[in-house]
């Protein structure tokens, strides 16, 4: 499955991978976000917080963090999280996905 192959690449920070994954992700119910983090280099533009305030928080206008309770929103807000990762101007948002078992 294409989503499974791409899942291993999601930590690359490559914008094209994010876009390709997003297209696949949106068409599949077989994967879900398991982890979100932010690498060094954030410029605190607040874009991700604007997209998904349940998950991202800009602290003191200097840095962005993934909120402690963000995991509760990974399913509900997956599209917003992927959009934030795709549009982050310095491409530092990382997403890990896992396959979801289906009955
Ligand atoms: S979109 Fe990127 S640069 Fe902007 S606040 Fe979020 S992590 Fe930082």
Image (cartoon, helix red, strand yellow):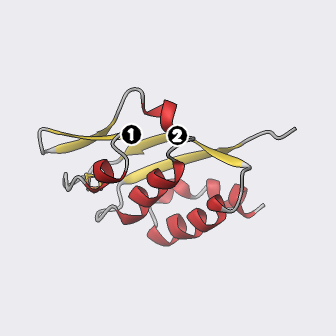
- Residue 89: which quarter of the image? bottom left
Q: Residue furthest right?
A: 103
Label 2, secondary structure: give it: loop
Q: Which mark is residue 55?
A: 1
Count the marks. Answer: 2
Q: Nearer the viewer, residue 38 or 80?
A: 80
Q: Which mark is residue 74?
A: 2
Residue at the image position 24 percent from the left and 52 percent from the top: 42
Q: Which residue occupies the extreme bottom position in the image?
A: 16
Please say if the residues under marks 2 and 1 sit with CB atoms less than 8 Å apart. yes
- Relative horizontal placement of residue 1, taking residue 72 as reference (left or right): right
On screen, 70 above or below 58?
Answer: above
Q: Quadrant of ligand 1?
A: bottom left
58 lies left or right of 100: left
Residue at disc 1, CB closer than 8 Å to ligand 1: no
What residue appears at the point 49 percent right and 45 percent down from the top-left corner?
Answer: 77
């Amino acid at each position: 499955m294409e989503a499974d192959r791409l899942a291993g690449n999601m930590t690359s920070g490559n914008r094209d991978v994010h876009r390709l994954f997003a297209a696949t992700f949106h068409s599949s119910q077989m994967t879900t976000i398991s982890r979100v983090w932010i690498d060094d280099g954030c410029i605190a533009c607040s874009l991700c917080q604007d997209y998904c305030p349940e998950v991202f928080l800009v602290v003191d206008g200097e840095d962005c963090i993934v909120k402690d309770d963000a995991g509760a929103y990974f399913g509900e807000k997956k599209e917003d999280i992927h959009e934030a990762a795709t549009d982050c101007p310095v491409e530092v948002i990382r997403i890990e996905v896992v396959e979801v078992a289906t009955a």
